[in-house]
């Protein structure tokens, strides 16, 4: 069983390494297939692990396996350790399964790109990193996986590195996530000194003896990492920009897997969060705020991928509500179904973008249904699943979260209300997108590509490597939710219960109330979208101020620019101008000046230097004396 | 064994100077001597028992009545610093052979002489021996920068000389006072001292060498004007002489003053970390970014040392090795960029990744390790350092963690300014990808970094024989 876990982890790494080392001695197509194969081998390993776990008794479904000691000093020791349990196995299956489909899709999508090899090396590397994250057997290795997925995300967002926007978006994603890494590291320092270990079980045990302040700090640090990685408010601004990357990247990293890592982290570390209930409530609250704000902003976006990106933020908000309230099974269930239908939406959108030779602006689209009927069906299925219409997958998982909220007392009911408003918004923005892009008369751009303009695009719906994964995900988006039906059967929840026992159990009545309200509001949202965007019977109420605020995404970018970036630049400038150049004398202008003088009379100038250095050293000593006196 | 490790490159230097070989041939000879030195170090590692303290000792009485002897040997941690030295210096000599400067014989001889002196610093177990090697290390550096440096070499050299001389003189005074009062100059035999002024004399020399804020005035000019391989050795290895000195002399011999001055030193180190990171973020060329980031990293390493607990000190040694390799590779790459484009200024670079996969991959990997991405050896070092300093106060760790974000900002800025976006005006079509000779220089450094990233424990479990403090005990 642990052998399967290692194969699962190492196959994609081997794929990435092979492609990198072989360089251009293998063809671009060969690189693509090596990468695809490596991820499907990983899926095989994940399946073997899953079957191995199933064969064991419920209480024995956990195994640790250590390759070697990664870091040690004195009694503090951290191994390169994997943990195989139902939670890890679930994530392994999602990551390698959906990942395999998306890499296969990339074989068609990236065909002809001159730097295909680099793309597929990065993709395999990402899958490896993500698997390391979900299989990590201690907190330090988890942080390693956490950081490496951020790196892979950086590399893939900035894949088209000659585009200024792509490079900027990649850096932004990495730096915001580095902030999350830093808060997690701080949480781990507290754990090291309070419990003496970063082993999961040891830390959970030791945490019970910790003070509530320390526990709150640990949980807050972990939440910081989770919020950054999962693009929840206030660390969310990198995700919409990340859409600069190739579309399969958005499907894999920024929808199905990496961005849901925050949800996984809260479930994995749930004993720590349960000891810090106020922080766990905070997680749920941030999720609720995010699901509303992202739903609102999605209403006014005009880039097809950005609409779906905001929808991703919003859906992860639901997951945060779920796991924040202790409904771990429900949160993970939504993570699973969301991986199916959101990857489907991105990949169907990718087919459209591919067909239209890279166009992403929905104002130039319309009537795509006439040229891409099967893609239209796939997108419709994804949209219905996203809105949560029965019997599609999103219905079961979203309603299970809402029912848990309804069952969680006063605070839960506030979140429940937010979730219902979110369901309405989801209906509107999802079907706005569907109606504008797929229905109506074909736009000039669509007509032009329908006839084919000799660019190699616009030939049917796409090659089989792209359509087959979309078809598989369409099926999964329909049936993926049937592993858990409220009040009837719940194998998925039972499967995860040995890892994380839920704190809330909604009654059957609460389940039905939540379902009826959520589906009703979802349908209402679709109706509004129909009236405004398809039948065009109603004009949008245009309140310029509101629209302006939404189009500027609530001014978060401007705010962060003003409170972080500009001050950093300003302080650096002040230090350079008033400390480094005059006092310490390492400046460029100082050097130029010095060199000019040196050209004339070297000897004389040097004695001049000597004086000024003696002065600089004296000044340095003086500064130090002042510091010493001030501190002591 | 230790003596052979010190004197092989010194003898090699003489050989290169004396044999009348043409430029390239003397370079090849020097490279072979450098590689032999690496092999000799590997033999020393095999002989070394990491469960024991000081080993591979050689001792010859020098001035009996003063208690001075030629006494050299290695601890686990100093053997790693010596390993860093011989590897980086061999790479530097190899690169110089490829670049083939004028008067190559003199140049290569000086590089070998420098190698032997630095190994001597890390092996010294007697204060006068330490002082002799410490000064011997500086002389070839003055000449290498002053003669073979860039346009403004005179300026950079004078500055470097004045700063280091000032530090060295204070240290010499401290050595004399310490040695005479102890009755011996031997680091093993001597006891501890509580004299603040003697401590500060040592501290001054090491603060200049590291450099620690605000003693870094020589840094940017020296790193910018040196030939790339000299800058690589200077930032990667020579700065670690300060680490050895601080740990082996300042911390080991002055326990009381260290306690007394711990907070001010941590303040200076922390300021250096933030200050260097922010200036690196606004610097305008590859070399300046690397220079200021070196300063920031040295601040971090000093924080680890002065956490005075095992986590922090072990992290500081690991980070010294990691930073040495990273910084050396970055300066060598800066040199390779300069030979192609004539500049390392960001404003004139850009778009080099297109069609140059090897250059792009190497720079990307080193840059990513430099910004301490989780899973890299520099991450392991920083994690231990910050975990150690956390015990002295959470604020130190919080500022240090913030500096990790700054490191991401300045390294990603460097990477994209050189490799990405549209092509810079200095980048011509003829600018080639890395040549095989250049790859032969940087790939071993890269391989060392990747190996250590897979298993940083190969160093941390071999630094110190006996666990000094117990992390889980400290919790109680």
Image (spheres, coloured by chain):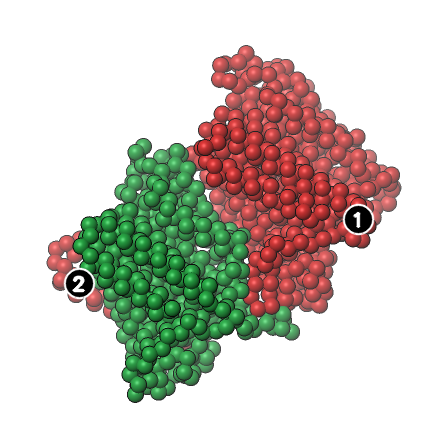
Pick the front one: A440 or B28: B28
Give coordinates of residue A456: x percent, y percent.
51, 18
First in sequence, mark 1 or 2: give its number.
1
Pick the front one: B356 or B440: B440
The reply to whether residue B272 is in sight is no
The reply to whether residue A97 is in sight is yes
- What residue is shown at x 48% (from left), y 39% (from top)? A20
Which chain's residue wears label 1?
Answer: A
**Which chain is rendered green in the image?**
B
State left or right for residue B207 relative to residue A222: left
Label 2: which residue?
A606
Picture quarter with the C terminus of chain A? bottom left
Q: Disc 1 or disc 2, which is closer to the eye?
A: 1
Which disc is residue B345 wearing?
none
Pick the front one: B320 or B190: B190
Give coordinates of residue A366: x percent, y percent.
60, 19
Up the image or down, B176 lies above or below B350; here it is: below
Residues indicated by labels 1 and 2 sit on the same polypeptide chain: yes
- What residue is shown at x 33% (from left), y 57% (from top)? B34
Give coordinates of residue A116: x percent, y percent.
50, 31
Mark 2 is surrounded, within 10 Å at the Cα level, by few (under 14), some (14 to 19) or many (20 or more) other residues, namely: some
Which disc is residue A56 wearing?
1
- Specify the colour of chain A: red
């Amino acid at each position: 069983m642990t052998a399967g876990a290692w194969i699962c982890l190492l196959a994609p790494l081997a794929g990435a390494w092979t492609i990198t080392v072989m360089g251009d001695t293998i063809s671009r197509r060969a690189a693509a297939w090596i990468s695809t194969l490596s991820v499907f081998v990983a899926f095989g390993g994940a399946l073997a692990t899953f079957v191995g776990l199933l064969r064991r008794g419920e209480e024995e479904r956990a195994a640790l396996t250590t390759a070697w000691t990664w870091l040690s000093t004195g009694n503090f020791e951290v191994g390169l350790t994997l943990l195989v349990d139902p939670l890890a196995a679930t994530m392994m299956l999602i990551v390698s399964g959906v990942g395999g489909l998306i890499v296969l899709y990339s074989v068609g999508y990236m065909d002809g790109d001159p730097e295909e090899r680099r793309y597929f090396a990065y993709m395999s590397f990402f899958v490896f990193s993500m698997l390391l994250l979900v299989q990590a057997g201690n907190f330090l290795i988890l942080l390693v996986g956490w950081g490496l997925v951020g790196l892979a995300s950086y590399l893939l967002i900035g894949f088209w590195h000659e585009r200024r926007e792509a490079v900027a978006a990649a850096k932004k994603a990495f730096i915001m996530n580095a902030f999350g890494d830093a808060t997690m590291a701080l949480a781990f320092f507290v754990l090291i000194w309070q419990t003496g270990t970063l082993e999961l079980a040891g830390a959970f045990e030791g945490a019970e003896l910790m003070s509530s302040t320390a526990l709150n700090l640990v949980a807050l640090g972990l939440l910081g990492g989770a919020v950054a990685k999962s693009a929840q408010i206030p660390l969310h601004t990198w995700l919409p920009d990340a859409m600069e990357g190739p579309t399969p990247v958005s499907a894999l990293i920024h929808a199905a897997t990496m961005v849901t890592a925050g949800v996984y982290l809260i479930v994995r570390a749930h004993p720590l969060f349960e000891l810090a209930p106020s922080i766990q409530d905070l997680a749920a609250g941030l999720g609720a705020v995010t699901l509303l704000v992202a739903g609102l902003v999605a209403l006014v976006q005009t880039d097809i991928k950005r609409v779906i990106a905001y929808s991703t933020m919003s859906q992860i908000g639901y997951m945060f509500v779920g796991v924040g309230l202790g409904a771990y099974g429900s949160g993970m269930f939504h993570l699973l179904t969301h991986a199916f239908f959101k990857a489907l939406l991105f990949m169907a959108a990718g087919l459209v973008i591919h067909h239209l030779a890279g166009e992403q602006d929905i104002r130039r689209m319309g009537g795509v249904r006439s040229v891409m009927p099967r893609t239209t069906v796939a997108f419709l299925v994804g949209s219905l699943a996203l809105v949560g219409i029965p019997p599609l997958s999103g219905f079961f998982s979203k309603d299970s979260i809402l029912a848990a909220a309804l069952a969680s007392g006063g605070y839960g009911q506030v979140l429940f209300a937010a979730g219902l408003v979110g369901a309405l918004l989801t209906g509107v923005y999802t079907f706005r997108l569907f109606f504008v892009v797929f229905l109506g008369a074909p736009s000039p751009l669509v007509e032009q590509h329908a006839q084919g303009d000799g660019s190699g695009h616009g030939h049917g719906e796409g090659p089989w490597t792209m359509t087959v994964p979309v078809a598989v995900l369409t099926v999964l988006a329909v049936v993926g939710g049937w592993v858990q039906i409220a009040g009837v059967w719940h194998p998925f929840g039972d499967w995860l219960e040995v890892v994380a026992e839920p704190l809330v159990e909604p009654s059957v009545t609460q389940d039905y109330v939540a379902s009826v309200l959520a589906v009703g509001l979802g349908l209402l949202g679709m109706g509004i979208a129909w009236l405004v965007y398809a039948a065009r019977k109603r004009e949008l109420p245009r309140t310029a101020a509101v629209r302006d605020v939404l189009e500027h995404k609530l001014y978060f970018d401007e705010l962060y620019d003003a409170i972080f970036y500009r001050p950093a630049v300003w302080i650096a400038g002040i230090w350079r101008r008033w400390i480094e150049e005059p006092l310490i004398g390492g400046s460029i202008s100082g050097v130029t000046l010095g060199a000019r003088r040196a050209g004339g009379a070297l000897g004389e100038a040097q004695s001049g230097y000597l004086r000024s250095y003696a002065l600089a050293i004296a000044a340095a000593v003086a500064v130090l004396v002042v510091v010493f006196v001030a501190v002591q | 064994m230790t003596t052979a490790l010190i004197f092989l490159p010194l003898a090699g230097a003489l050989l290169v100077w004396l044999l009348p070989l043409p430029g390239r041939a003397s370079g090849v000879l020097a490279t072979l001597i450098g590689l032999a030195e690496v092999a000799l170090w590997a033999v020393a590692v095999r002989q070394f028992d990491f469960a024991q303290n000081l080993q591979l000792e050689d001792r010859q009485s020098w001035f009996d009545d003063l208690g001075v002897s030629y006494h050299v040997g290695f601890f686990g941690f100093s053997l790693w610093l010596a390993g860093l030295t011989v590897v980086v210096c061999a790479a530097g000599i190899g690169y110089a052979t490829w670049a083939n400067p004028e008067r190559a014989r003199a140049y290569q001889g000086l590089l070998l002489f420098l190698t032997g002196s630095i190994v001597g610093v890390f092996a010294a177990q007697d204060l006068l021996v330490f002082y002799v090697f410490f000064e011997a290390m500086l002389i070839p550096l003055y000449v290498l920068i002053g003669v073979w440096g860039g346009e403004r070499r005179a300026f950079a050299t004078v500055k470097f000389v004045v700063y280091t001389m000032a530090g060295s003189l204070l240290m010499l005074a401290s050595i004399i006072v310490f040695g005479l009062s102890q009755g011996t100059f031997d680091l093993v035999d001597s006891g501890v001292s509580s004299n603040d002024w003697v401590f500060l004399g040592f501290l001054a020399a090491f603060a200049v060498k590291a450099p620690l804020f605000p003693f870094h005035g020589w840094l940017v000019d020296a790193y910018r004007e040196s030939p790339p391989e000299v800058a690589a050795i200077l930032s990667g290895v020579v700065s670690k002489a300060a680490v050895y000195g601080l740990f082996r002399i300042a911390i080991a011999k002055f326990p009381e003053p260290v306690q007394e001055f711990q907070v001010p030193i941590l303040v200076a180190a922390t300021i250096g970390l933030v200050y260097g990171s922010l200036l690196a973020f606004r610097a305008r060329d590859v070399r300046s970014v690397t220079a200021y980031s070196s300063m920031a990293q040295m601040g971090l390493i000093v924080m680890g040392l002065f956490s005075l607990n095992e986590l922090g000190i072990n992290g500081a040694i690991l980070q010294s090795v990691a930073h040495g390799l990273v910084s050396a590779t970055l300066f060598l790459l800066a040199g390779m960029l300069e030979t192609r484009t004539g500049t390392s200024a960001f404003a004139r670079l850009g778009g080099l990744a297109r069609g140059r996969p090897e250059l792009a991959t190497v720079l990307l990997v080193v840059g990513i390790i430099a910004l301490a991405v989780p899973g890299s050896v520099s991450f392991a070092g920083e994690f231990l350092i910050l975990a150690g300093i956390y015990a002295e106060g959470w604020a130190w760790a919080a500022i240090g963690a913030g500096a990790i974000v700054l490191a991401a900002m300045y390294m990603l800025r460097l990477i994209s300014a050189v490799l990405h976006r549209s092509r810079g005006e200095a980048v011509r079509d003829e600018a080639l990808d890395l040549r095989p000779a250049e790859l032969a220089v940087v790939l071993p450094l890269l391989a060392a970094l990747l190996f250590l990233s897979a298993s940083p424990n190969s160093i941390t479990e071999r630094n110190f024989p006996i666990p000094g403090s117990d992390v889980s005990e400290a919790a109680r």
